[in-house]
Amino acid sequence: MLKFCLCWRPAMASLTLAIGTLLGCSAGIAEDFKKEYWATSLAGAVDEGILQGLYDAVDRGEIGWLDIDPKYSIHPLKPGINLIFYHVGGNCYIGSDCERFPSSGPTQDRWSDSERVIDLDDPLAREIVVRDLVALVRQADEIAPDGAIVGVHTDNVHRLSAAALANFFNAFLTAVDAARLQGSISKTRQVGYVAKNNPKAFQQTLEQRLLEVLPLYQINENASLNQDGTLDRGSRLAQDLGRQCGIPIFLKTFGSDVAYTVEQDDEKIDIHVSQDMAREMAQKPNISGLAWSVEEENYHPTMFVQGSAVRQAPTRFCGK
């Protein structure tokens, strides 16, 4: 079975997929495994305890990610911290944001009071969002330390097929290349994207070689354990992606999530995802870490648990 090799090429757009030993990659190169630390918040600044954990991880020589909404204040970044900026992606915010798109529809979920759905399969809608993402990369490029990776965390892509995901993220990477040539993004800056939910479709894009670049990491939200200690289906799919491709897998869960329901004295009792359950999930194979928040309405983790170490660049493989 062929394996795909992903090599960092700092002077180029970011990464290039190749087969076998193309571009100097080799299965015989010694592998370096490192722990990853994911400091994140989409509702205000990152929790101080998690932020200190990020600094400590980077001091230990581990890989650190700061994944935030850029509208909130950003602490000064020390060398070794990679910077990821959030974008609402396949949704738009009601008002002037949604008015930029040719059409939008109701989300039919808890975010319907503030957001609407847009169609990233539509070329015009895709172009608008890609422009937004490139602007975020330019902003991150100005702030991030020398040598840090910058990237985008694009939300609400869970509805997209494998082909649509590939069209969207390949368009983003092409636009980054154009911005480099124009001089608005540093030519030596490594740029990437985050895979958000939808792990099966992301896996298909890589197996079918539709995506030119592996994601920096995969996030799977609303992770949980069932009564026998097994991860939910989406998290298991993300695990498999991490195993095949050697990318970090970060789970996100909330104390408001119901993991399972038990019957006691003829009464059904919901068992919510506790901090102890979160710690257990983080120790599952091919899970790099887990962020736990009190409730889903507030995307503000107060606990991050590190998991497995991950094989590092310059060599990563994707394939069974």
Image: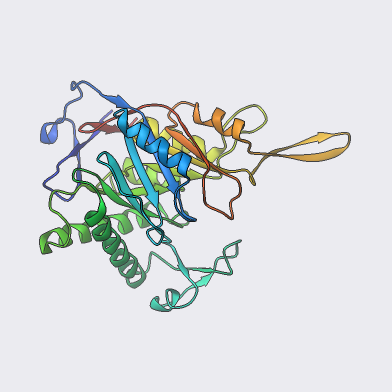
Question: How many marks overall?
Answer: 0
Task: Residue at 19% x, 43% y: name it.
Answer: 147
- Whether 193 is drawn above or below 138: the answer is above
Rendered-image quadrant of the C terminus: top left
Query: Can residue 208 be seen in this snapshot?
Result: no
Query: Can residue 70 be seen in this snapshot?
Result: yes
Closer to us: 259 or 146: 146
User: Which image quadrant is residue 127 in?
Assistant: bottom left
Q: How is the image coloured?
A: rainbow
Task: Residue at 14% x, 30% y: name it.
Answer: 21
Closer to us: 57 or 48: 48
Query: Is 29 situated left or right of 61 in this image?
Result: left
Residue 238 percent coordinates (x, y): 45, 38
Task: Residue at 18% x, 20% y: name it.
Answer: 28
Task: Residue at 44% x, 29% y: name it.
Answer: 307
Closer to us: 244 or 112: 112
Residue 210 percent coordinates (x, y): 29, 49
Residue 114 percent coordinates (x, y): 54, 69
Rendered-image quadrant of the N terminus: top left
Closer to us: 297 or 173: 297
User: Which image quadrant is residue 171 in?
Assistant: bottom left
Query: Is 285 situated left or right of 75 in this image?
Result: right
